[in-house]
Amino acid sequence: MLWIIISLILFLCCLLEVFLLLLDHGIAAQLIITAKNMAAIQGWKAVGASILSFVIGKIRDVTGSSKRSKHFADDSVYIAFCPSGGLGDYIISAKVLENIQQICKCSIDVFCEKQQFGSAVYGSREDVCLRDYREFEKSRNSYDLGLLVEHFVHVKNYNGRRLRELSPVLYEKVQYIVTHWNQLYVNIPQQHWRERIQFERCRVLGLDRWTQLRMGEAFEIADKNVFIPMDKSFLEKWKQEGFAKGEYLTINYGADVMRAGFNQLKMWYREYYVKLVKLIHLEFPNMKVVQLGGADTEAVEGCDKYVLGESIEQTKWILKSSQVHIDCEGGLVHLATQLGTKCIVIFGPTPLHMYGYEENINLQSEGCHNCMGVYGDWAYQCFKTGSYTQCMADITPEMVLKSVKRVCQRE
């Protein structure tokens, strides 16, 4: 009888959600677009698995049913931690994980959509295990604390009694987020508008992509440094290529694939990269240029070495010994900066006040920049022109070369 009542309640809740979606076409459209983009990259099977995991998680939220076994066997706080986004987002979210590890004895399962990124950032950490993100919604209720980290730290579930007993400090931080959620969160269903408002809030408050994760007064985010695990076996492999530290620089012509078959507008022009490589070779005849990127990345003519589609572990060592890394705002910039390599970063739609590092050389057009989130398709179609991107065109190869000279102490 109880299950019949619960099933009826869940059915009515689903009807209510469908009704609300029909009232707000923006929400429905956003969900459909997200599902289509995910299907284009990962297939409809992955979409179905995500929906199933979400539904099971919702049922367990309502019923309170979950398997609580080994997670409650000792005095550790067991945490389900799910970072979202790309490589750069994974790196930044790790700051929250490290903050929690400093607070209490804990065991953290990190649920990653992109396992390669997860291994590169969260692998080899003490008391941290990697799991498939599709299991997050289904299993998070079996943990003492479930966190989803994006531009905000979402407290998905928590065991108040266990947290209060094992870590009063962490309990207070969780309570702070839950209590102040309406003030901390931007409650707008459309992701692009939600992020745009959050970026403006951060600009006013003097926060950035890192420090916004303080969630008011909950976490102590004092700097922009996290631990990046390094596999030394890949260092030996790179040494065999004959590229010594400081004798080469790296470039990347690429960005996260959020839509199959399309490049993001924040990518600097390929023809600009080709010209830049020529200028670098003319100015620095002994300086080699190494292009990094994924397996599907278009090669930039004139480079001395192409490392495309190789392991991120290999990329780490290449970046670490690079004289300078040239890129648009993206994951490799975050990775290189963590490894101590200066970057020349070409900013376009992405807000510099959110994603820029003070130690890097950040270039942006004076005439057009920072349009991220002004409308739904900002990442792929220029809001101002529909196609031509002034923000990228204004940053010329000669301007970037001037920055290269600064790094190489020629000017």
Image: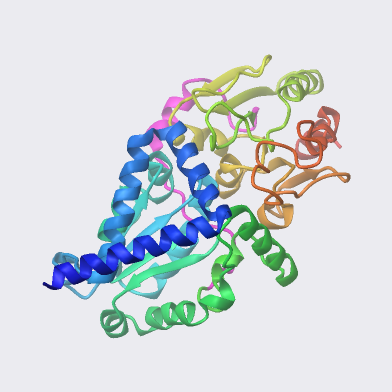
Q: Quadrant of the N terminus?
A: bottom left
Residue 168 magenta: no
Can you name the residue that lies furthest to the left here?
1
Task: Using the image, determine if residue 17 lies above or below residue 341.
Answer: below
Is any part of residue 142 visible from this angle? no
Where residue 369 appears, as percent x and y from the top left, is 79, 46
Is any part of residue 365 visible from this angle? yes
State which region is magenta. 220-249
Task: Using the image, determine if residue 347 lies above or below residue 268.
Answer: below
Report the colour scheme: rainbow
| Residue at x-position 45% and y-position 33% | 41
Report the label total. 0
| Residue at x-position 30% and y-position 52% | 53
Residue 239 magenta: yes
Q: Is residue 286 left or right of residue 307?
A: right
326 or 135: nearer the viewer: 135
194 or 365: nearer the viewer: 194
Q: Is residue 347 left or right of residue 53?
A: right
348 or 382: nearer the viewer: 382
Where residue 216 appears, as percent x and y from the top left, is 57, 76
Give the quadrant of residue 170.
Answer: bottom left
Magenta residues, dominant SS class = loop
| Residue at x-position 29% and y-position 60% | 57
Q: Is residue 126 left or right of residue 360?
A: left
136 or 19: nearer the viewer: 19
Where residue 361 appears, as percent x and y from the top left, is 75, 45
